Image: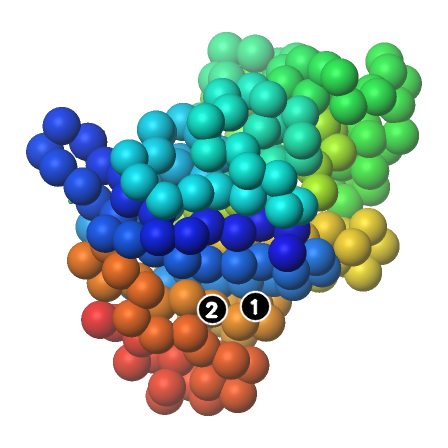
Amino acid sequence: MLLEARQLRSGYSIGDVLQGISIAVAPGEIVGVLGRNGVGKTTLLRTLIGLLPVRDGSVFLYGRDVTTERAHSRARRGIGYVPQGRDIFPDMSVIDNLRMGQFIGATRATTANSPDFDLAYRYFPFLQQRKAQRGSTLSGGQQEMLAIARALVSQPEILLLDEPSDGVQPNIVNEIGDAILGLKAERQLTVLIVEQNIDLVQKIVDRAYVLDKGRVIRVLDVDDIRSTSRLAEFLAI
Ligand SMILES: Nc1ncnc2c1ncn2[C@@H]1O[C@H](COP(=O)(O)OP(=O)(O)OP(=O)(O)O)[C@@H](O)[C@H]1O
Ligand SMILES: [Mg+2]
């Protein structure tokens, strides 16, 4: 497995949010994390990347126990993260936002004219035309694409995406879906995606975990995902 969590518990001062979550993502898979608001989807991603401490259970990357490793060292091992709400640097230019991605992955063999910038530009060509523009001047969908491109620059093995469709117009959601599928085909990129948009889930997701109250309550296979009525039931819970 590329990424695995076993019996993960974590949370905030209010108490545990994740109540013992086990998930596994194989190389090349696009795995969904579904569930209604507040069930712990973002908490799960933040725990997997090391932004929130693990209270119990373990996280493995390529079989290596990284449970106590800090976020930056997990990033160097190849976890890319695109946070909910994107968190681009609004006052920085597009190119400087991308450079921050390069900085995050500084030891992952990137150089100033690295092909990784080319990769980001190839999948999201508007970024090249708008290199000098401030991040805040981009639309919500463009900011999301910038956030994904920023994560790509550090050459992740696995990309964790938190609701990339949120506040994004449907044609751009579709473009983001195409880019993810393209990266999977070209780079064998592995993806763990939190998503509530039924079209995007059906377009890209191979398998999905449904969360409720900090627990996995169901694993959906590709047939469950293709069935709009079955999928809608789990997106609505
Ligand atoms: N920084 C925080 N401090 C305290 N409690 C938090 C914090 N962030 C989230 N929570 C609480 O933890 C629980 C899970 O939140 P989380 O953000 O993981 O949910 P989510 O499934 O991502 O929801 P959404 O679909 O709204 O993004 C919620 O009850 C939330 O109020
Ligand atoms: Mg969330």
Q: Which labelled disc corresponds to residue 24?
A: none
Q: Please tell me whether mark 1 sits on a helix, a strand or a loop.
A: loop
* Residue depicted at 85% across the width and 13% down the height: 112
Residue bearing mark 1: 205
Disc 2 Cβ-to-ligand 1 distance below 8 Å: no
Outermost residue, left direction?
A: 14
Task: From the top left corner, tell me how far across and down residue 142 is, in percent.
Answer: 57, 38
- Is 130 situated left or right of 109 in this image? left
| Mark nearer the viewer, 2 or 1 | 2
Whether the residues at callouts 2 and 1 have beta carbons within 8 Å, the answer is yes
Residue type at tag 2? Ala
Q: Secondary structure at mark 2?
A: strand
Name above or below for residue 121 compared with residue 131.
Answer: below
- On screen, residue 31 above or below 226: above
Residue with the mark numbered 2: 208
Residue 55 is situated, as x and y percent measured from the top left of the image, at 28, 35
Residue 99 versus residue 86 in the image, above or below: above
